[in-house]
């Protein structure tokens, strides 16, 4: 029998910046494939992800853990860099974590890793767009991966996976796609560098309460039937496939649970509009337009900064 081809290994470094670790929790609860299948088996035929560093789930701690990360960085193998949480640019030292007990500056180390990585995946709204840590007063100077990479002239391909937290499928399938087909080109990503296969349609388009919106039936209090736009639903402004994919293995999602969409996959979250449970003035946002007959018309982000009318 012919020998089985050697499995190609792709090292991965997972950094955690300013955040809550909720993105890690989400990915750890992936159903198909499971996180164990991703990092222990072949994520794609003949290809295996070797998660070398993840401060929350790895067994090693302290200097030993950091040495593993630094060894991966210094090696010749191309590696994938995953960033969870925003980059705290003014409170960045991690005391005693570097070689010989020296402080390891998080921002500087992210920059060096991003320069050398084959690609950067910013998982969650904090890493992709700044999120809650970057909201005012932002004393830690938190910034998104894209902002920091632009400031340092880093041209490494970047994929943003918005969400607070993102669906585990968005991460698992993105990694599998990269391993199978290589890095997506510009046409596969929207203006915010999100994969269009997950973030290509407004939640509003597939919401089960969309018929109520079209019929003008709006809930005025939580628990009532009808569209929740008056209660602050951000579905008309948010691009994600939550209505079709759902969470917890397809069990439920925000709208089915009686909550408005908070727009957590968008660049403006959590500052999208006047508040989580406050109605957005449709005419005040660039992603939505009021037509002559008073209906909502979304403006769909095009590739890399252009806009296309829906």
Image (cartoon, grey):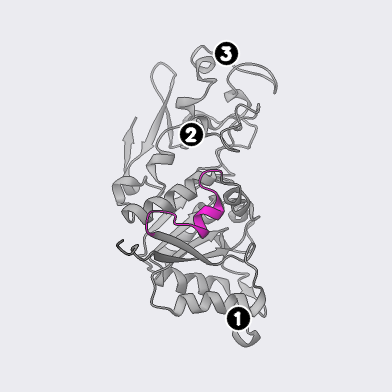
Relative to 70, say whether 218 is above or below: above
The quarter of the rendered structure image containing the C terminus is top left
Secondary structure beneath label 2: helix
Task: Point out the tag, 2 or 3, that comes first from the N-terminus.
Answer: 3
Q: CA distance from mark 2 to mark 3?
A: 19 Å
Q: Is residue 41 magenta?
A: yes
Q: Which residue is mark 1?
A: 98
| Picture quadrant of residue 151 | bottom left
Q: Secondary structure at mark 3?
A: loop
Q: Position of residue 291 (x, y in %)?
A: 39, 22
Task: Please tell me which residue is depicted at 29% across the width and 46% down the height of the picture.
Answer: 187
Mark 3, residue position: 217
Can residue 130 be seen here? The reply is no
- From the image, which quarter does the N terminus lie in? bottom left
Q: Residue 219 appears at what percent x and percent y?
A: 64, 18
Which residue ends up furthest to the bottom in the rendered image?
100
Residue at 55% from the left image edge and 76% from the top image edge = 68
Q: Is residue 139 magenta?
A: no
Mark in the foreground, 1 or 3: 1
Q: State the residue in front, 72 or 44.
A: 44
Between the residue at mark 1 and the residue at mark 3, the CA separation in whole angstroms equals 58 Å
Considering only order in the chain, which callout, 1 or 2, is on the residue closer to the N terminus?
1
Q: Position of residue 180 (x, y in %)?
A: 34, 53
For residue 14, the mark is none
For the record, the magenta segment spans: 31-46
Q: Give the labeled residue for mark 2.
A: 237
Q: Give the distance between the C-alpha atoms of the residues marked 2 and 1, in whole angstroms.
A: 43 Å
Among all residues in the image, which is located at the extreme top? Answer: 215
């Amino acid at each position: 029998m012919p020998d089985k081809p050697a499995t190609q290994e792709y090292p991965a470094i997972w950094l955690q910046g300013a955040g809550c670790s909720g993105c890690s929790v989400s990915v750890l609860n992936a159903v198909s494939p499971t996180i164990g299948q991703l990092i222990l088996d072949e994520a794609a035929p003949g290809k295996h992800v070797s998660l070398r560093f993840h401060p929350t789930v790895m067994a090693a701690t302290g200097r030993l853990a950091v040495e593993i990360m630094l060894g991966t960085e210094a090696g010749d193998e191309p590696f994938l860099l995953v960033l969870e949480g925003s980059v705290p640019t003014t409170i960045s030292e991690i005391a005693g974590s570097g070689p010989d007990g020296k402080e390891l500056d998080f921002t500087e180390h992210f920059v060096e890793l991003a320069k050398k990585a084959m690609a950067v995946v910013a998982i969650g709204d904090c890493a992709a767009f700044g999120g809650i840590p970057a909201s005012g007063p932002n004393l830690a100077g938190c910034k998104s991966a894209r902002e920091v990479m632009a400031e340092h002239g880093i041209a490494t391909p970047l994929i943003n996976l918005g969400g607070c937290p993102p669906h585990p499928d968005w991460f698992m399938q993105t990694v599998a796609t990269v391993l199978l087909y290589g890095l997506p080109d510009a046409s596969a990503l929207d203006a915010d560098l999100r994969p269009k296969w997950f973030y290509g349609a407004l939640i509003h388009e597939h919401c089960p309460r969309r018929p109520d919106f079209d019929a003008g039936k709006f809930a005025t209090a939580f628990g009532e039937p009808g569209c929740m736009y008056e209660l602050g639903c951000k579905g008309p402004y948010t691009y994600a496939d939550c209505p079709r994919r759902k969470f917890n293995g397809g069990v439920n999602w925000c709208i089915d649970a009686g909550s408005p969409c908070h727009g957590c996959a968008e660049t403006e979250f959590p500052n999208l509009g006047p508040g989580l449970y406050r109605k957005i003035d449709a005419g005040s946002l660039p992603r939505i337009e009021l037509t002559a007959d008073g209906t909502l018309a979304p403006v769909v982000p095009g590739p890399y900064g252009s806009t296309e009318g829906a």
